[in-house]
Amino acid sequence: MNSFLTLSYNSLFSKLQSVLGTGILYHSVTGLMVFLLGLVIGWIVKFLLNTIGRKLIAKTESDLDDKILEIIVARVMAIAAITSMYFGLQELSNGLNVSNATVLQFLEYANGALFLLMAFVLTAVAIRITDTLVSHALHSIARRGSTNFDQALAPLINRVANILIALVAVIIALDHFGQNISTLLVSLGVGSLAIALAAQETLSNMIAGFVIMIDRPFRVGDRVKIPTGEEGDIYEIGVRSTKILDFDNNLLIVPNNELIKTKIVNYSYPEAHIRVIVDVDAAYGSDVSEVKRLLLKLAHAHPDVLKNPAPEAFLISLEESGLQFRLVCRVASYTVQFTTAETLRVQVYKAFAQAHIGFPFPQRVVSMKKENSSNEFPGSEKRKSLSRKNR
């Protein structure tokens, strides 16, 4: 197949040379044919992408390939036109001699402009594809973590990636025109190092935020406890910090770098079920079995108490004033933990009153010792009388 195409190509241009000669007319016609051939190839590629390409990517579940295909299809003809025009002008310049110095200079400038235009188009395509890939990746991570982390981080990553792609395009263009880029590369390296040192803490928090999204120690809505003792619900996971809404409706803003280095208690992960503990004291002489039966009955009757695991009641301590019982049960979420415990305490108080089970109160045994009527030590009167006799 390749030998056939090569033979046909050589035969076609041999016939053109025999008819038009090898002068400027031949190269002009050849350049025009190269331009038209490039347009035809571009149209064929676009047609194949719109037909066969779309059918192939329709079989995939992700929409990422659809977005990338749209970006490429929209710019296929522009790339084909610029490329074919560039090589067409190259073919035309081959037919000019030194006497046409002005025309050659113009064609050289035109080729340079076409190269810059092609670099601009390819850079735009690379930027669009990079933005799509970054947004898709961050959105997938944020969706698994139920956060809006992608909305905060995606613009920053896209901006940095766009700057890097633009710098690469500028370096390639300068190198194409024979410019020395070593000084530029050294300046960029020094500048990047200075920026990295100045923004060390910010970059550390950003990397920590990304680690939190990957590791997912907590998600938005989880109730956590940080080492300082504060508790609250995760309100937002940002690029630099994580916001925690405490019980007073205040926002605690904690840098991400601190969160990944400390111990955090997550009450909502891996399950939202949480334990409810109700401690109750009963007076000495109370029937232990009856007290435990009442506690379990109240727990089973409460609508928010889970049946599995089943509630349990224990006699945990013999206090100086009474018997201490503990009711342990579980609820579906920390949001009803406090209200469930409070309701059970009220019900226990009423049930004890109806069952005539007393609550203990502090008791003290006081021993009274009779003191001597005299303020003096015992035997002091006897010693005084003896001393009088001796006188």
Image (spheres, rainbow, N blue to C red):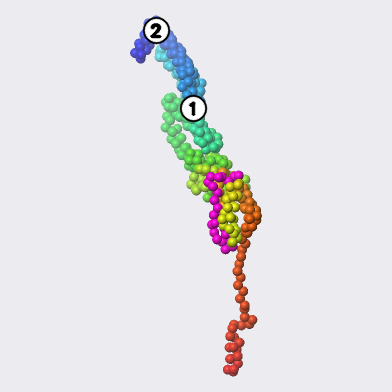
Say which element carries label 2: helix
Q: Examine the structure image and report whether residue 323 is included in the region drawn in magenta.
A: yes
Between 382 and 291, the one nearer to me in the picture = 291
Residue type, mark 1 in image = Glu
Between 330 and 310, the one nearer to me in the picture = 310
| Residue 205 shows in this picture | no
Decide: is 16 above or below 49.
Answer: above
Residue type, mark 2 in image = Leu
Q: Which quadrant of the figure contains the C terminus?
A: bottom right
Q: Residue furthest top?
A: 19
Position of 197 with respect to 303 (left or right) is left
Write the start and end of the magenta stretch as one range: 303-326
Position of 87 with respect to 373 (left or right) is left
Image coords of residue 367 (percent x, y): 60, 72
**Residue position for label 1:** 61
Label 2 crowd bin: few (<14), some (14–19), many (20+), radius 10 Å:
some
